[in-house]
Image (cartoon, rainbow, N blue to C red):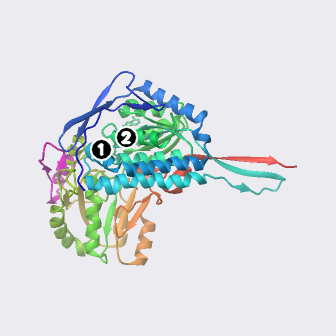
Amino acid sequence: MSVNRPTIEPGRLFIDGEWREAEAKGRRDITDPSTGKVITTVAEADASDVDAAVTAARRAFDEGPWSRTPGRERARILHRVADLIRKREDELVAVESLDVGKPVSLARAVDVATAAEEYEYYSAMAQSVDGSTRQIPIPSHAYTRREPLGVVAAITPFNFPLILSSSKLAPALAAGNTVVHKPAEETPLSALLMAEILAEAGVPDGVLNVVTGGGAVVGEALLRHPGVDKIAFTGSTKIGRHAAATAGEALKSVTMELGGNAANIVFEDADLEKAIGAVIKGFVFNSGQFCMGGPRLLVHRSLHDTVLGILEGAVAGVPVGDPFDPAIVVGPMAGLRHLEKVEEYVGLAKAEGGRIVVGGERLDLDGGYYYRPTVIAGLGNDSRVVQEEIFGPVLTVQPFDTEDEAVAMANSTPYGLASGFQTQDLARAHRVAARLQAGIVWVNDWAMLDPAIPFGGVKQSGFGREYGPEALESYTRVKSVVINLS
Ligand code: NAD
């Protein structure tokens, strides 16, 4: 379905139910990655705006009504959010595609559809934020209550703005918290549209506040603000480490959803056609700007040359270009800095003796930040290109001989967000799934995600889980009440 490029009004901050300019009147340009041209500006907040947003969220939490609204009523409002997302689907698709450079087909089928499902899923769960009764050997009535934490600072990265803000806001709000949301400075547009949608759905003033601006100022002010109870952070391991340490100083609750560098293992018994599909999806999806992508292909030596041959043709045929063309699968990178990082890593791969099987260069189109999907063979496992997170449409391919070797190579990076493999052997599926160091493991496909399935990191990919009842619980704390009946 075709979508037109929208015109975007300049964005303002959303604080206490009102649209406001930043107190210091700062503005930031927002660029269309498919042309490199400025499409609009948004307010550039500073610490005083963060303080106003946290104060509004604090008041909305402490005085209510949201934190005291019955779960069923919160559920109704969050369900309306899901309905409004679907009603305004075209608008959200256009904004997300324009801002991030996502193909409209991807933005519709994945980003906007998933955001609606996230609100739907947690709206159902808002009705069962329950405690339980406990038996103890004295005459008493003892029970637990599950209570919201308070003010949540939701800090999100540039690559899936709508999905990742909804994956925090939906459970946080379902549990009765209030939120100050800081989207990534490069891609804040859908967060502003969602503020409008949540208000229209009936989320009261002060319950959701959106503050746009840079990490070093707005993000930092949120980490340090004494009125914030929880930091829900998604982003790079480098910034996450700093965020966790800063929040830890003040003993704030934290969840850290950080970087990844997953391996996709193709065993000798794989269904090759399906395996190739999973491999390509795993590294070109969202121009490779996917924390749970599969940029490291480990393939059994007996299949290595065959797989490289198939990939050479298939990857060259992936349609790359204007994200507003419904037939396009890979759009531009979201910003120039991401494109330059990919170029740097491909240069390093060549210097380290890697062989470019396909791609390996920019695609010159309309001044946009395009990079051709790229496959690199011949690198050793300790190559930086293999070990580090590139975050672009680049796949390295390495052979292995045994299952033990494949598992060791898969687990050999500092990251542990996702992992996956392709096999027809059921016993191997369970055996290898148990040995992979990752928060989520996919077998015979890639990127099977759903709000019901928790994901999150181990090792340097962070801690805490998004999705599932696990995420909802992470926005609550347990209080015990014991009443002496004697
Ligand atoms: P980033 O770490 O540069 O930025 C993430 C957010 O942190 C942004 O909103 C940024 O403004 C903010 N920030 C920056 N400095 C800050 C500071 N000093 N204090 C507080 N906040 C600050 O990440 P990015 O480049 O936007 O996103 C890419 C990274 O995110 C990749 O590493 C990717 O793997 C990771 N990621 C992880 C997941 C996951 O679920 N684990 C999902 C998506 C992306």
The N terminus sits in image quarter? bottom left
Q: Quadrant of residue 335?
A: top left
Count residues near mark 2 (Cα–Cα under 10 Å), then give few for <14, some for 14-19, many for 20+: some
> Horizontal placement of 72 versus 23: left or right?
right
In this view, the residue in front, 432 or 153, is 153
Residue 429 part of the magenta-drawn span: no
- The residue under the point 17% across, 49% down is 347
- The residue under the point 54% across, 34% down is 250
Indicate which disc residue 193 carries: 2
Residue 351 part of the magenta-drawn span: yes
- Disc with the residue nearer the chain's start (1 vs 2): 1
Residue picked out by circle 1: 95
> How far from the left and from the top, in percent, is residue 77?
51, 46
Segment tinted magenta in the rendering: 343-371
Q: Secondary structure at mark 2?
A: helix
Q: Are marks 1 and 2 in contact (CB under 8 Å)?
A: yes
Point out the residue furthest to the top here.
24
